């Protein structure tokens, strides 16, 4: 009988001890674009760009690894939420998203060589479905610029509605490669985008 009466108290004390050790959960920051078309929530590892760079439809961020401080970061990201010139139907956009994802490596090669660089390898290529169910793509690759600087790039796109397009682009710091952990954090940022 004594054991039954003390178990709830012991459980409550254990839970309080766990909370005291872990501390309160970090508050997540949600930002809207100035144009009011969408918002995103910053996961751990993504911070507002300390030097600014926002526009009416774009928010600028840095990818920060554990231990990085000040002007030291793994890369830069921009999320742009705009009205497309010609809103697509779901069918048209699904076809376009499939073309981008299926042709991701060739598009990356074309983008790099068009700027005089050398394509190295794909780091990631997967679908990106928005919170509203629109298909998209999320690709990452490694390349060397024409100046000989090695860098990773992420290019992703989806829709939140027929008239709301989302584009995410990221570039690693000079001579850095986005790690799988960096890409996971960037993907969390992409998955947080909402109306």
Image (tube, grey):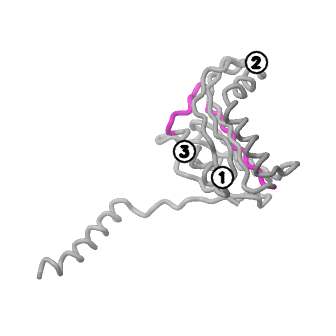
How many marks overall? 3
Residue 79 percent across, percent down from the top left: 70, 47
Disc 3 and disc 1: Cα gap in Å? 16 Å
Which residues lie in the magenta part?
163-181
- 179 sits left or right of 134 in the view: left
> Front-most of 61 and 86?
86
Disc with the residue nearer the chain's start (2 vs 1): 2
Residue 180 part of the magenta-drawn span = yes
Q: Are marks 2 and 1 in contact (CB under 8 Å)?
A: no
Quadrant assignment for the C terminus: bottom right
User: SS at mark 1?
Assistant: loop
Residue shown at the point (71%, 43%) measured from the top left: 157
- Residue drawn at x 66%, y 52% is 130
Residue closest to the eye, 73 or 126:
126
Residue ID for mark 3: 185
In this view, the mark in front (3 or 1): 1
Q: Which mark is residue 130?
A: 1
The residue lying furthest to the right in this view is: 85
């Amino acid at each position: 009988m004594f054991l039954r009466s003390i178990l709830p108290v012991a459980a409550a004390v254990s839970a309080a001890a766990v909370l005291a050790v872990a501390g309160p959960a970090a508050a997540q920051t949600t930002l809207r674009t100035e144009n009011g078309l969408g918002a995103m929530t910053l996961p751990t590892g993504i911070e507002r760009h300390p030097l600014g760079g926002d526009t009416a439809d774009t928010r600028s961020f840095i990818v920060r690894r554990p231990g990085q401080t000040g002007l030291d970061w793994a890369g830069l990201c921009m999320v742009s939420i705009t009205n497309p010139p010609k809103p697509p139907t779901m069918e048209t956009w699904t076809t376009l998203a499939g073309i981008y994802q299926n042709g991701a490596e060739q598009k990356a090669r074309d983008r790099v060589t068009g700027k005089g660089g050398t394509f190295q390898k794909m780091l990631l290529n997967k679908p990106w479905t928005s919170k509203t169910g629109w298909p998209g793509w999320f690709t990452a690759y490694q390349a060397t610029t024409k100046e000989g600087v090695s860098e990773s790039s992420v290019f992703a796109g989806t829709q939140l509605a027929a008239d709301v397009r989302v584009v995410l682009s990221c570039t690693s710091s000079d001579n850095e490669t986005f790690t799988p952990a960096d890409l996971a954090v960037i993907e969390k940022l992409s998955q947080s985008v909402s109306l």
